[in-house]
Image: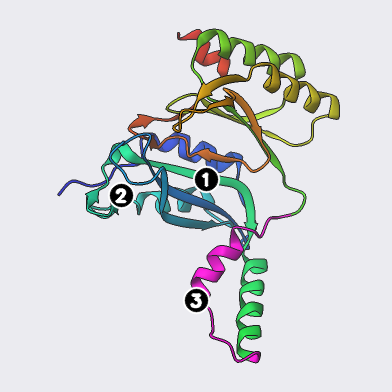
Amino acid sequence: MNFHTFIYNLNDIKQFGSIFNLNQKHLALCLYLTVRRKYYPTLSRGAIIVNRITVTGGDDFEKRLYQNILRLETPIGSYTDGDIIVPNEALALYVNIEPKDTVKALTRTLSRCMEAISDREEIPDAYALYREEISKSEVKGIKYRQIDLDTKDINKVKQVNELITTLEIPILICIETRGGFHIVYKDDITKETKRLLHEFKQNTSFCKLNVEGKMVTDHWFSITSSPRVIMPGTYQGGFPTRIITLNQWLDIQ
C-alpha cells in the first residue's frame, strides 16, 4: 500500500528544531497539515487543514518533532476532500513558529467548561475547545516576523538579499518553498528598519486580475507578524523544501 510521504531531509527538520528549540515542557509548537487547491486544481476549496499536531517542549524536542511528522505518513486515502482522495502533491506541512502555552490553554478550556456547567448550559467539546485555545495562547516576550518572498525571479531575489544585507536584518532561518522563500527574523529591529521594509513592500507591489476578473493589488514581497512557515525538509505540493540562505541560492543559479 502506498503511503503519504512528507519527510524529505531529516537534517533540515533537526536544524529547524534546534533553532526554535523549546526547553520548557509547557510550551509547544503547532503544526498544520494542509491540502491546497493551488497544488491540485480538482479540490473543492482553496485550503483545508486536515490534521493538527501540537509538539510540546522539554527534553528531546527535536526527536519528538520528527516523530510527530513521521506519524503523518499514513496510507494514501487517509485524507480526502469529498469523494477525492488527496494525493501527496496536494499536501503541505506548515508550522506556527510562535510558541504556545499549553497550561494557559488548558486553564482557559477548564474555565469555559466550568462556566457552562455552572450556567447549566451544554458542555462544549473540551478537545475542540482546547485546540482553539492553544492557537491563541501566545507566550509573551517571544516574537518573530516573517518575510514571505513569493518569487524565484533572480533579479528580485537579489534585490531582497541586498536589502536584508544593507539593513542588517538578523535572519534566523530562510526556507526555500515551492514558489519562493520564507524568511524569519526576531522582531527586535529598529523602527527605521521596519519603515524601510514596509516602504520596499509598497514600492514592489503590482496589480493583477483576481479569480473574479477584478484588478487587485498584490505583493511578491510581504511581511507578517504571525509567522507560519513551511516545515523545511518536508514536501510542499511535491516540492522538496530546504533551509538555504539567499546567497547560497543565488550562487547555484
Above-or-below relation of 43 to 174 = below
Mark 2 lies on residue: 73
Q: Residues within 10 Å of mark 1 (few under 14, many from 20)?
A: some
29 vs 77, nearest the viewer: 77
How far apart in space, not on screen, are marks 1 and 2 (Cα)?
17 Å
Q: Dot 1 corresponds to which residue?
A: 95
The C terminus, quarter of image: top left
* Relative image position of residue 220 (x, y in whole percent): 57, 22
Q: Reading the chain from its start, which is encountered first: label 1 or label 2?
A: 2
Residue drawn at the location 63% of the way across and 52% of the way down: 99
Residue 63 image label: none
What amino acid does circle 1 point to?
Val
Q: Residue furthest left?
A: 1
Residue 120: within the magenta?
yes
Q: Quadrant of residue 117?
A: bottom right
Badge 2: residue crowd in 10 Å (few <14, some 14–19, many ≥20): some
Residue 244 appears anywhere in the view:
no
Residue drawn at the location 67% of the way across and 67% of the way down = 104
Q: Earlier in the sequence, mark 3 or mark 2?
A: 2
Which is more toward the observer, 176 or 71? 176
Q: Position of residue 12 (x, y in %)?
A: 47, 34
Amino acid marked by disc 2? Glu
- Residue situated in front as seen by the camera: 253 or 12: 253
Q: Please report contact status of discs 3 and 1: CB closer than 8 Å, yes or no.
A: no
Quick check: 4 above or below 196? below
Residue occupying image coordinates x 78% and y 28%: 194
Residue occupied by mark 3 = 125
Specify the segment rendered in magenta. 118-139
Q: Is residue 88 visible?
A: yes
